[in-house]
Amino acid sequence: MTPESDTTIRGGGWRVVARKELADHLLSARFAVLIGVLGVAAAAAVYAASSGIRDVAPQAIGIPGLFLKLFTVAADPVPFPFVTFVGFLAPLLGIMFGFDAISGERSQGTLPRLLSHPIHRDEVILGKFVAGLAVISVMLTALTIFVSGIGIFRLGVSPTAAEVIRLTSWLVLTIVYVGFWLALAMVASVLVRRASTSALSLVSVWLVLTLFGGLIFQAIGSIIGGNDQLAVARAQLTVARLSPVTLFQEVSTVLLDPTQRAVGLITFDQVDRAVVSALSVSQSMLVVWPQVVAMIAMTGVLFAWAFIAFMRQEVRA
Amino acid sequence: MAAYAIETRMLTKRYGDAVVVDRLNLEVAAGEIFGLLGPNGAGKTTTILMLLGLAEPTGGSATVLGREPFRDPLAVKRRVGYLPDAVGFYDGMSGRQNLRFTARLNRLPTDQAEPAIERVLAEVGLTDASDRPVGEFSRGMRQRLGIADALLKDPTVLILDEPTTAIDPEGVQEILALIRTLADRGVAVLLSSHLLHQVQTVCDRVAIFVRGRVAAMGTPQALANEASGPEMVEIGVSGDADLETVLAGSSDVMSVTPGKHRGTWLVSVPPGRTPELVSSLVGAGIGLTGVRRTAEDLDDVYRRYFDREASHDARV
């Protein structure tokens, strides 16, 4: 028995886990189903939007960010623009790739065996998070490039450099947003032993926040705000911004539309005699910077929660 | 270097008020096979998890290969092979792919990993099935693959939790022979089981573990002698011989009762006196159709220790 240095083994264990998880995800049925569904829906949304833009082509010359309108304008017969629809469905990606991350290992009986090998517990959860986020990034990037291609082909307009930067920043922040849901799903997979229970609770959180979130925030806001209308509106906005769904909507709106100069409440005084003009990319970024930071922080907190809960848990079922 | 491969001193684990492992002292030397025997829920698996650094001891200490498992888990886990109870694998992957993942977790370079995988698959007799998905494996095959998984890192210490459950009797003998071979190479083996009669043949020493405490520790032979009470013998006789009257005056015979079937009797004698009983019957001219020792149930052994513990508690 020779004494071996511990440094040879430290670090990088999460890579082994991530590599295996990535291969699992890419070969899984859920990956094929999701990319198929998202691809068809996204193509339909962009096709409809491009038709709408073509119809008004003569007036459209010179509109700032025309190419980005592909992603933000809804046209018959598809009720949602691409951005809304990604905002709605993207959480599902996070949920799908995370809801059974740890509980799956438990139910297969692989967790004690996995942890008996020279790997830290935190490397398991980190590897799974990284692999999930990697798959999600690949899917969303492919999707965005795919619909951009359709758009260029249909409109005959290629994006300007500024538009590419806007779209890329939006894509990165969408991945962060999905990362929030992935982290939430991992928390559920640590705390809830049954994968089906975990999936159902996550889907209910997702539906409540995206579909009924607005109503709930309004109700809470009006209770807090009292009688003053402005106070009510402020309170409603503050409450709504506790939800990552609201944050992502604001980020999307501002980043993909150069004419959006602010998010939230604007009084008449503020817009009085304002000159309508497009913002530069950096200015748009500045407008939503607090939202961006909040989204990253929320994701970090959730991941830390999953991490700590898993570290404290019994290995045995 | 530590004197023993595994050593625990007053090792204790509490969950709330429940004491699962109570002041456990044991040591396992290199090349020794140590059996941790006890009913389900006795604290065997908890002890094992503490030895692997997967559970924190409430009190006392454990040392594996000179290191504290909970403080220095990687150093311990790098050299300890572990077969969990009800071992699981990724069902969608083949046996070989599962082992490849294990090899990567253990940082085996690829050129060393493939021969090592072949070697351990051959050792557990799974070479032919290794490219089938584990989802198609029987429980016995999973168990063998679990042993291969534990052996892949070429361990210095091997901890096996219920290694023989779900394996057919022939397979059990193969597994036990493999464990013996490993021990002869100098591997320290700690195995837990509730199947005393299966593992006693292979263990150098055993500890009987009841409610978190060691009720008895020693070689299987010593324990068997200590544990066994009167021997129960079922005797079949030809004709209508009435053993109750025949054996009435015999000093060795403790009791005689009619058996379940006509012509059978249950006779109890002091330990080791069955041959004398048989020869005395033959001497009395009785035709014997069968002599069968009714083996003492393992549960009886446990219960005996369990009762002793309980009465000891009452006295203290």
Image (cartoon, rainbow, N blue to C red):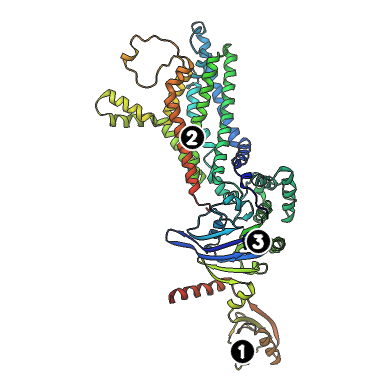
Q: Is residue A37 or residue A76 the one in the foreground? A: A37
The residue tagged with tag 1: helix, strand or loop?
Answer: loop
User: Residue B190: percent from the left, percent from the top?
Assistant: 62, 62
User: Residue B133: percent from the left, percent from the top?
Assistant: 68, 46
Which residue is depicted at the point 43% across and 10% down? Answer: A277
User: Residue A310: percent from the left, percent from the top?
Assistant: 50, 46
Q: Is residue A104 or residue B31 the one in the foreground? A: B31
Q: Is residue A19 or residue A6 the one in the foreground? A: A6
Residue lying farthest bottom? B249
Which amino acid type corresponds to the residue marked 1 in the rendered image? Asp
Image quarter where the N terminus of chain B lies is: bottom right
Q: Is residue A302 above or below residue B140?
A: above
Q: Is residue B303 above or below residue B113?
A: below
The residue tagged with tag 2: helix, strand or loop?
Answer: helix
For marks 1 and 3, the one nearer the N-term is 3
- How far is the residue under mark 1 from the one under mark 3? 44 Å
Q: Are marks 1 and 3 on the same chain?
A: yes
Which amino acid type corresponds to the residue marked 3 in the rendered image? Ala
From the image, tell me which residue sits under label 1.
B252
Q: Is residue B1 or residue A236 the one in the foreground? A: B1
Which chain does tag 3 point to? B
From the image, tell me which residue sits under label 2.
A181
Which residue is depicted at the point 57% across and 19% down? Answer: A148
Classed neighbour count for the residue bearing mark 2: other residues with Cα under 10 Å, few (<14), some (14–19), many (≥20): many
* Residue A26: quadrant of the picture: top right
From the image, tell me which residue sits under label 3.
B188
User: Residue A271: percent from the left, percent from the top?
Assistant: 35, 13
* Residue B5: quadrant of the picture: bottom right
